[in-house]
Image: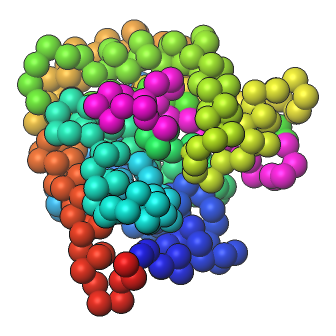
Amino acid sequence: MYRSADIPEFQGDKVKRGHLNELGLQFDTVLPWFVAGPEQQYTRISVLPEQAAKWGDVLRDAVRRAYISDQLLADRAVAAKTTRAAILAAKLPDPGSVMSGDFGEIVGYIYLASREQAAVAIGPKKWRLKQDRTKAAPGSDVVQFVLPQWPTASVADRLVCAEVKAKATTGNFAPIARAMEGSQKDSTSRLSRTLVWLRERALFDDIGAVTLEQLNRFINATEFPPYTRQFHAIAVICAALVDAELAALVPGNIPPGCALVVISIPNLQATYTTVYEGAHRSVVEDAEKPEAIA
């Protein structure tokens, strides 16, 4: 069984319960991954090959925890009289477009959290709420809350939302344009519907380190001080394809109020495949450790 003391989210006050910690990641590990290019009308982030090469080992547990917490994974295996590997296999997507899309969303989720060094960003783990592992999760892709004075609501509170599209192989799919289109939907109505849906799911399911009170702070906004909404369009693209995708970008088409981020990852398909293979393998390896408890 996973030992709670080994997982940062359970290490008490010494570790903030931000969602990077909930995934078992630390800021000093994550920050070097995202190398920003020169300032333009959008943000270009390049993950270096030597960093991406480590993700199979570094991100496998974080990706696993995005879909199911370590404790729930162990509990469900006991309740179902089966293995953790079988439970995890019923949660993770198969190789293909859904896996690529999920991975892009998780990378976008981690990237946005890594920018919050002065405050803690928390957010629901929407991948835990998927009704069908072969399909994408509904609603806005990434939702994060920054609540610097919580449990007191303040005008410094921020709601961060992102639409994420990924492109790992050649084809006509235009991830930048599609991400910007989705971000517009978020800003007009989809984010509000997503928050209500998350509150309903939180009544029954584990959505991560987010409380109903925190959700209500943004859903029942008129009952609290004003807050800031920040909308992002994030395109996660294989490094071999990113220049061609950027060549088609017309900066004037970036919607007002939408922060466009293009994240370039070397060998994206091979990278996410290795990470998910590692996530599957991790529960088998844990069970084989001498200290593991059946």
Q: Quadrant of the N terminus?
A: bottom left
Q: Is residue 214 magenta?
A: no
Protein image colouring: rainbow
Image quadrant assignment for residue 284: bottom left
Residue 115 visible in this rendered orientation of the protein: no
Identify the residue at horizontal 17%, vertical 60% (top origin). 53
Q: Nearer the viewer, residue 276 or 151?
A: 276
Provide the major secondary structure of the magenta segment: loop
Q: Residue 76: where, in percent of width, then height? A: 45, 58
In the rendered view, does 199 fall on the left or right side of 68? right
Q: Nearer the viewer, residue 115 or 285?
A: 285
The magenta-colored residue range is 129-153
Q: Residue 100: where, in percent of width, then height? A: 24, 36
Q: Is residue 73 above or below residue 238?
A: below
Q: Quadrant of the C terminus?
A: bottom left
Q: Residue 88: where, in percent of width, then height? A: 32, 54
Identify the residue at horizontal 23%, vertical 52% (top origin). 276
